[in-house]
Image (tube, rainbow, N blue to C red):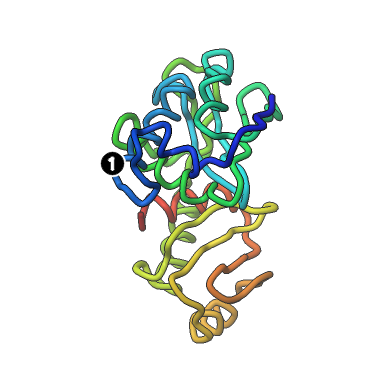
Amino acid sequence: MKNSTCPLWSRIKRIFGGKSCDNAEAREELALAYIKAFGGAENVVEITHCSLRLRLKINNLDAMNEDAILKLGARSIVKPSQHTTQIVIGTEAQTLAEDIRLEWKKLNGPVVSQQGVDFTANNTAPVIKPTEEDLAEAEKLIALIGKHNITHSSEAAHRLLIGTKEANEAVVAELEAAGYELMAKGDRLLINVERAEVIAQAINDLCL
């Protein structure tokens, strides 16, 4: 399903009575509107993003209101599998994902267990959760990069993408000295690790 209307942030004034995208209240309301359109916080298992899309794990795709999602500014909706969907947003995807994740955690954040794979309460969608090794890996990366230097973390092309406040050659040197393979450097670090998606979420939970 596609949307041919104007980009997301230019629609906020119409959606929320003239408030701009820099208005915290408007951003919160927009995030909550998306969560409602996703079928409610309880229908969402996981929220991540790539450069242009929101990536969601959903309990029940039929509970999503696709028309409402498109009216909120999404460009299109893709459903790769029975319990996953990708919402094409544009270059604002990262900001929107962070806003949605923040409000979603307030409403219905996931409980982290020590099991590698668990299930949601209604047993409809598998939830990949961090093991002790995953958490240790996340903590190690946070220590090397600096907790207050990390702005976000996500999986990108099966690798770990960590955004930082500024490029730091010393951080890159420390990561490489610790044995990490960096596919991209600068203020966006692309690191080759196993279970990148799980570690990314663990880093977000520990830092953000």
Tell me which residue sits at (65%, 29%) in the image.
3
Q: Give the residue pinned by disc 1.
A: 25
List x then y, in percent, for residue 112.
39, 39
How many marks the image carries: the answer is 1
What amino acid is labelled 1 in the image?
A: Glu
- Is 138 drawn above or below residue 81 in the view shown? below
Side of 177 relative to 115 (left or right): right
List x then y, in percent, for residue 93.
54, 47
List x then y, in percent, for residue 106.
29, 36
Tell me the element at label 1: helix
Tell me which residue sits at (51%, 21%) in the image.
68
Q: Residue 122 occupies which quadrant of the picture?
A: top left
* Quadrant the N terminus occupies: top right
Say which of 13 and 162 sits in front: 13
Tell me which residue sits at (62%, 60%) in the image.
193
Side of 111 relative to 115 (left or right): left
Side of 165 relative to 187 (left or right): left
Tell me which residue sits at (53%, 18%) in the image.
64
Determine crowd level at label 1: few under 14, some 14-19, many 20+ residues with C-alpha closer than 10 A. few
Say which of 176 and 78 sits in front: 78
* Quadrant the C terminus occupies: bottom left
- Is 86 drawn above or below residue 169 in the view shown? above
- Is 86 drawn above or below residue 168 in the view shown? above
List x then y, in percent, for residue 4.
67, 32
